[in-house]
């Protein structure tokens, strides 16, 4: 299962890195509108004559950039909070966990829509808004793992020997957390990609950036989308790409979770 997910992600990563420079000259040009797929335009054109293959390839870069940036930032922020809460405990732990509970109780999507509408459009605005509402779940997961690591004999020995807390965290607590953090990053990447696509589909994304969500937004704004069959080359490719990336991230995340959780190690869901 993990190999399938990694293969899917690798294909889209290669497309995001290599294809946009090759298709950049097509993004700024317009052709005859609503052309069906052809040799010149493999995915046809939209209602104002923009090449859809170039848009889909450029959308891969935007979606993966948002997913990676937001996933890493949310996991880093949440990891630092969980590390501090789990290791130091006491009043700091209680205060941070009540803050985590508050953010976990708020539905993500409605709050993200409100923040995007209030802060304005922009790729980095979406990233910041996503990190603001998504750090709590990684924080809780990291805290739980830190509490387990604190009970290790070598951690207790390091504390009794008088080693500074930052050395213990860096040398003994943080390294075992890396596999968990990797799984959390993959999971949050999927949430961020879906969030960016959802906001762009609602018209709250960056109007100057080409993403799969903006492609779907413009496609469904076209009144004859399902009457002339243009949905087959306009909306369908972007929707399939988005679904495949989310599937790839989900497969990798589930595989990592199965390897990390002792309760799931005996249940092999795939290779």
Image: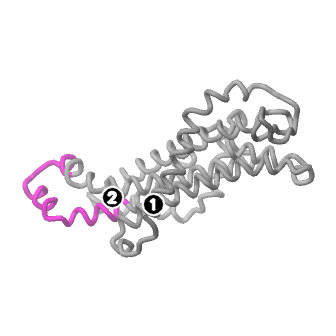
User: What residue span does the magenta drawing correspond to?
Assistant: 142-168
Which residue in the protein does label 1 denote?
Answer: 100
Q: What mark, if any, has residue 199 been given in the picture? A: none
Measuring from the top left, give residue 46's x and y in whole percent: 82, 39
Classify 31 as above or below 251.
above
In the rendered view, does 25 fall on the left or right side of 177?
right
**Percent coordinates x, y for residue 4 in the rendering:** 50, 57
The reply to whether discs 1 and 2 touch (Cβ–Cβ < 8 Å) is yes
Q: Quadrant of residue 33?
A: top right
Which mark, by number, is residue 85?
2
- Residues 22 and 198: in front is 22
Residue at point 72%, 36% (across, down): 207
User: Regarding mark 2 in the picture, which secondary structure is present there?
Assistant: helix
Q: Is 213 positioned to the left or the right of 94 in the image?
A: right
Residue visible at 13% across and 57% down in the picture:
159
| Vertical arrangement, residue 244 with respect to residue 65, above or below | below
Say whether residue 193 is left or right of residue 161.
right
Question: Was residue 154 drawn as part of the magenta stretch in this picture?
Answer: yes
Magenta stretch: includes residue 69: no
User: Residue 271, how many percent across, how many down?
Assistant: 43, 64
Point out the residue furthest to the left here.
161
Between 156 and 189, the one lying in front of the other is 189
Overall secondary structure of the magenta section:
helix
Q: To which quarter of the image does residue 243 belong?
A: bottom right
Q: Secondary structure at mark 1?
A: helix
């Amino acid at each position: 299962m993990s190999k399938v997910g990694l293969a899917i992600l690798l294909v889209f990563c290669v497309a995001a890195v290599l294809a946009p420079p090759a298709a950049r000259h097509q993004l700024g040009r317009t052709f005859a509108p609503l052309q069906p797929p052809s040799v010149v335009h493999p995915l046809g054109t939209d209602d104002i004559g923009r090449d859809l293959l170039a848009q889909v390839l450029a959308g891969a870069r935007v979606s993966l950039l948002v997913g990676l940036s937001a996933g890493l930032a949310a996991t880093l922020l949440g990891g630092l909070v969980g590390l501090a809460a789990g290791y130091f405990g006491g009043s700091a732990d209680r205060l941070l966990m009540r803050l985590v509970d508050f953010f976990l109780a708020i539905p993500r999507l409605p709050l993200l829509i409100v923040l995007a509408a209030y802060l304005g459009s922009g790729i980095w605005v979406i990233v910041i808004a996503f990190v603001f509402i998504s750090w709590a779940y990684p924080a809780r997961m990291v805290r739980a793992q830190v509490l387990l690591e604190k009970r290790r004999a070598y951690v207790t020995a390091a504390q009794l020997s008088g080693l500074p807390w930052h050395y213990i965290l860096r040398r003994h607590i943080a390294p075992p957390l890396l596999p968990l953090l990797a799984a959390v990053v993959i999971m949050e990447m999927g949430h961020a990609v879906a969030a960016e696509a959802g906001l762009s589909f609602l018209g709250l994304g960056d109007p100057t950036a080409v993403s799969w969500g903006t492609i779907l937004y413009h496609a469904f704004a076209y009144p004859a989308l399902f009457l002339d069959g243009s949905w087959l080359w306009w909306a369908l490719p972007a929707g399939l790409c988005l679904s495949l990336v989310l599937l790839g991230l989900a497969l990798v995340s589930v595989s990592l979770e199965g390897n990390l959780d002792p309760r799931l190690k005996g249940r092999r869901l795939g290779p």
